[in-house]
Image (cartoon, rainbow, N blue to C red):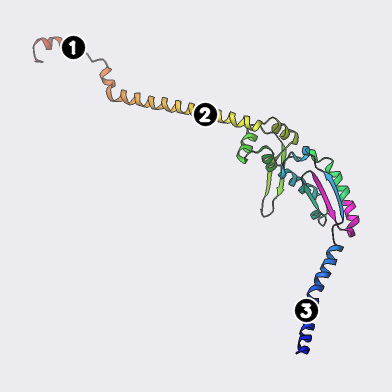
Amino acid sequence: MPVRFAQTRKILGGLAAAIVAPRDRGSRQSVSTSLSLITEWPLPPSATLGSSVRTKGIEREIRARLPWAVRKYVKAETGRMTLRMREDDAEEFEAASNKIAKALETIAVLPVLPREAEDILAISSRERHKWLKNGRLQSIGTRTVKMRGRSKAVTFHVFDPKHIEDILDRDLPSLWREEDAQQVTENRRRGAGKAALTRAGKGSEKGRGAGNNPRDDAPRPKLKGWNAFDDEGLLR
């Protein structure tokens, strides 16, 4: 009995060692591949305009300027841009840091995309299209991109960040909505007035057609000798 117990204990100890060994190797590997190289840059509100969609757009723009293998290590967060890489990639880390720093120098003038403008101004796509058409939103040009999953390229308008910031500071979307509501009310009033006039005109035409025959208003023809014929009493 003690011999069997010792053998069982030995087998269980071996299984435990086999289970723990890979975990130890994995922990050592995670330590060796940790992202120990870290650098950060500030993202001022003048660049993001307080929009998470704009922040994500800046992240995509920065990543597009970097090598494919480095892009995943760049992340835009609230108020900052971060680059984290492994210690073994020191050369790539330095090169990417220089490119990011140079790109961020002009990030405040990066054109605002349509979805970013909607998020910054808290407007709908319908309002953006309408106000772009009537000139309230001023486009600085168009951009054409090939969207993933689409066979055709998409062209859209982009906006100046200063123009969007000015609209936001003056709360112009609220003013434009009030003006649009007043215009809709005025258009409905005019439409109702025109419809009433049209109905009134059709009613008067029907009244003239039913009660006033044009033949009744025409002068009766005068016949020669009609009076003499009446004097003879032939009409009685």
What kind of residue is marked 3?
A: Leu
| Helix, strand or loop under label 3 | helix
Query: Along the horizontal axis of the image, is 216 left or right of 189?
Result: left
Q: Residues within 10 Å of mark 1 (few under 14, many from 20)?
A: few
Q: What secondary structure is marked by label 1?
A: loop
- Quarter of the image with the N terminus is bottom right
* Residue 20 vs residue 113, the one in the foreground: 20
Residue visible at 90% across and 52% down in the picture:
94
Q: Is residue 82 among what the camera can see? A: yes
Find residue 185 and name its label: 2
Looking at the rendering, the stretch of residues picked out in magenta corresponds to 79-95
- Residue 224 badge: 1
In this rendered view, identify the residue nearer to me: 7 or 158: 7
**Residue closer to the observer: 110 or 34:** 34
Residue 142 percent coordinates (x, y):
71, 40
Q: Residue at x 86, y 44 (%)?
A: 102
Relative height, residue 27 to residue 102 (above, below): below
**205 sits to left or right of 236:** right
Instruction: Kindly state the secondary structure of the residue where label 2 is placed.
Output: helix
Q: CA distance from mark 3 to mark 2?
A: 81 Å
Residue 136 image point, x, y percent: 66, 31
- Mark closer to the chain start, 1 or 3: 3
- Residue 186 in the image: above or below residue 18: above
For the residues marked 1 and 2, what is the alpha-carbon distance in whole angstroms? 67 Å
What's the residue type where badge 1 is placed? Answer: Lys
